[in-house]
Image (cartoon, helix red, strand yellow):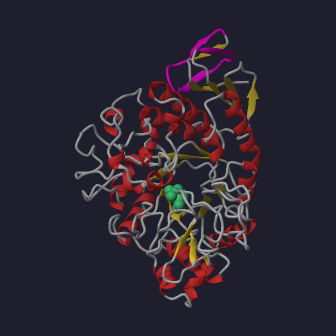
Amino acid sequence: MQPEPWWRDAVFYEVYIRSFADSDGDGVGDLDGIRRKLPYLADLGIDAIWVTPFYPSPMHDHGYDVADYCNVDPQFGSLADLDALVGDAHAAGLRVVIDVVPNHTSSDHPWFREALADPTSAKRDWYIFRPGREGQPPNNWQSVFGGSAWQRDPASGEFYLHLFDASQPDLNWRNPDVHEAFHRVLRFWLDRGVDGFRIDVAHALYKDVALRDDPSGAERSPYAWDQDETLEVWEDWRRLVDGYDDRMLVGEVFLYDPERVAQYVGADRLHQAFNFSVARTPFDADAFRDIVQRSLRLFRRPGTTPTWVLSNHDLVRHATRFGGGEIGVRRARAASALLLALPGSPYLYQGEELGLEQSIVPPELRQDPVFFQSGRDGRDGCRTPLPWTDEPQGHGFTVGDAWLPFDKDAADRNVDTESRDERSTLSFYRRCLRLRRDVVLLEDDELTWLDAPDQMLAWRRGALAVVTNFADTAEALALDGDVLLSSADAPAMDSGHVTVPAATTVWLSVSG
Ligand code: NOJ
């Protein structure tokens, strides 16, 4: 029998590099900062880190605008720092997954510069240039960041497509040379020993061949996203990655239809895809039961596993989504404890282990192009730097001036302070992740749902029972066992009943 692949039930931790740990005092996190914090990550009990882009970039989209796919931006360190990080992570028993951004490059990338400078050059067809319609863009597609998805090139009068910022021109995946170029990029990093790739906007790449207008005029044209041909790219990448030992691909498939997301994964496509429907699920028993059941049905099959995503660097932190303040954090812990007991891979986002909420960033300190271009609040509030200590100047993140302000609660919610408090969210995550390894993963991964009152969910996985009370009052359930973990106060066990406090998940060891 084949041994189970390492990523099957691995807990991934997203390191948003700019905001994790700054080793050189410029106020921006870097590779060496991550390396120095590996003991923290290993002790937390995760299995792998996903590091957001560290490539040379003008940083208009904070690194998702790549100007060189095979190097490191000096702001983040050097290739030697990357090698040292991978080496030390492996020595600490952690895998390293890095971001790859194939849908678009930076407008500073030499490929795009050549395409602009010489419309007759081969590089012109690496991008999507089209004449306008009576001076207007070639079609009505909208950019995710706001406004038309087309930018006029004044020199030629043609427009180029950018589904994100105008500084992020979309590549033309109908050109075979683009495929070849990314083969080289993947091999460059695989040869250096990275364990896999998180693929940015893995549901983009191919566009409708005729670039048809979207009749609905919606923000996301069905002709600009999720084209079947894109799946062939993932089949091709899977073959390439399978030529190496033990590597994996996880796709950022930002679709809210899990049935469709399921098309992207499997034994000959991506190993995993982010399940963003989980991050859209309200704190409600029926809603959670529905998404858990659907996800298990769709993703627990040979060649892939479910993923559980509550937060990341693009989303409002889940403690805030669930109501904010004390109740929001309490619900966030309950939801995490529920998901961490399921088969598959949880993807944690840095700071959720501290119970961080969405920060309020004043307009004059904003950085995110989404804030400036779309009229939406943008993503700065989930990207504020990780507080390591209660020291107001730099919070152990930097000795300089951090690129974004710290959260207002950083004096209480930081690694040092929480490490000293048994009841903190950090201590809870550590317990949870330890028990996941020592107890949960030893159980069979078949789930049996138990009868439970409204606003409670209860299920068993072998000898483990997991009960979540979604209500704002304590609720009781007929169940006997030994309490292994509670996301808040301990439940009361009395004559064959467990009384679970409000907004709490408990793990019990049960027999029979
Ligand atoms: C998804 C990334 O997570 C986001 O931060 C970025 O702005 C877009 N892709 C464009 O690359």
Quadrant hosting residue 56: bottom left
Residue at x 43%, y 42% (from the top left corner): 351
Quadrant hosting residue 84: bottom left
Q: Nearer the viewer, residue 299 or 115?
A: 115
Residue at x 58%, y 77% (from the top left corner): 127
Q: Is residue 20 left or right of residue 303?
A: left
Q: In this view, does 63 lie to the left or right of 122?
A: left
Q: Which of 72 and 363 is in front in this view?
A: 363
In magenta, the rendered stretch is: 474-495
Q: Residue furthest top?
A: 495
Quadrant for the C terminus in the image: top right
Q: In this view, does 298 lie to the left or right of 106?
A: right
Q: Does the magenta stretch include residue 283?
A: no
Q: Position of residue 231 (x, y in %)?
A: 72, 66
Residue at x 55%, y 59% (from the top left corner): 147
Q: Where is residue 47 in the image (x, y as percent from the top left)?
A: 51, 50
Q: Nearer the viewer, residue 303 or 173?
A: 173
Q: Which residue lies furthest to the bottom in this view?
A: 120
Quadrant for the N terminus in the image: bottom right
Q: Position of residue 143 (x, y in %)?
A: 57, 60
Q: In this view, does 347 lie above or below 170?
A: above
Q: Is residue 300 visible?
A: no
Q: In this view, does 358 lie above or below 401?
A: above
Q: Is residue 480 visible?
A: yes
Q: Where is residue 228 in the image (x, y as percent from the top left)?
A: 75, 65
Q: How many labels does the image show?
A: 0
Q: Is residue 477 magenta?
A: yes
Q: Is residue 488 above or below residue 230?
A: above
